[in-house]
Image (cartoon, rainbow, N blue to C red):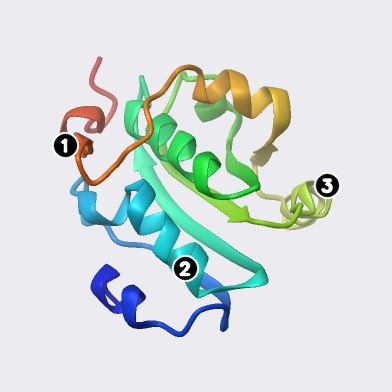
Amino acid sequence: MCIRDMAEEPAGERDLVVGDAFGGLSVPWQLTTREAMQLVDRALADDGVYAVNLIDHPPLGFVRAELATLREVFGSVVLLARAPVLAGEDGGNLVAVASQRPLPADAIAEALTDRDLAWQVAEGDELDRFVGDAAVLTDDFAPVDQLLTPYGQP
């Protein structure tokens, strides 16, 4: 479904929306903005969840901006990533999970551990530090192609 279709979605009927729209390191900026996230939020039930697959490499400018954007729209946001990515030392795929309701970060972390995945969950202060002062992406300001770092280039 494209973002234009989200505007046509009945409000409050989706339990889950999954975002996974990139090819290599090409991310459609229209799917990253505050306005797009507001459409996703509108389609979600009160306890609905948005899970989005992201990609970036250090300095992780795009991921930080997308997280800042998600945090502006949703009441609860967690980030799932490998420890070197959370430390800003590596890149690749990450998953952000957002909802208006508190997310079960401990249960998510336990599920990752139970499956022997080397991923961690960042929330609260750790996520604050990771996001830093990243700008919120909007329909008027979404330089995704300038923020996204291809394949670990400095």
- Disc 3 designates what residue? 106
Q: What's the CA distance linking mark 2 and mark 3? A: 21 Å
Q: Measured along the vertical axis of the image, is residue 4 above or below residue 91? A: below
Q: Residue at x 43, y 58 (%)?
A: 38
Q: In what element is the residue under mark 2?
A: strand
* Residue at x 43%, y 30% (from the top left corner): 64
Q: If you read the primary sequence from the N terminus, does the residue marked by circle 3 or circle 1 appear first?
A: 3
Earlier-in-chain disc, 2 versus 3: 2
Q: Secondary structure at mark 1?
A: helix
Q: Are the two marked residues, 3 and 1, in contact with CB atoms closer than 8 angstroms?
A: no
Pick the quarter of the image with the C terminus: top left
Would you name the residue on which mark 1 appears?
145
In this rendering, the answer to whether 48 lies above or below 105 is below
Under mark 3, the amino acid is: Asp
Q: Find residue 95 and report its horizontal and vertical position in percent.
A: 51, 50
Quick one: label 1 or label 2, which is nearer the N terminus?
2
Residue 20 x, y percent position in the rendering: 37, 62
Does 10 sit above or below residue 118?
below
Q: Quadrant of residue 120?
A: top right
Type of amino acid at the residue the image marks with label 2: Val
Q: Residue at x 36, y 22 (%)?
A: 58
Name the residue type under label 1: Asp
Label 3, label 1: how far apart the Cα atoms are:
34 Å
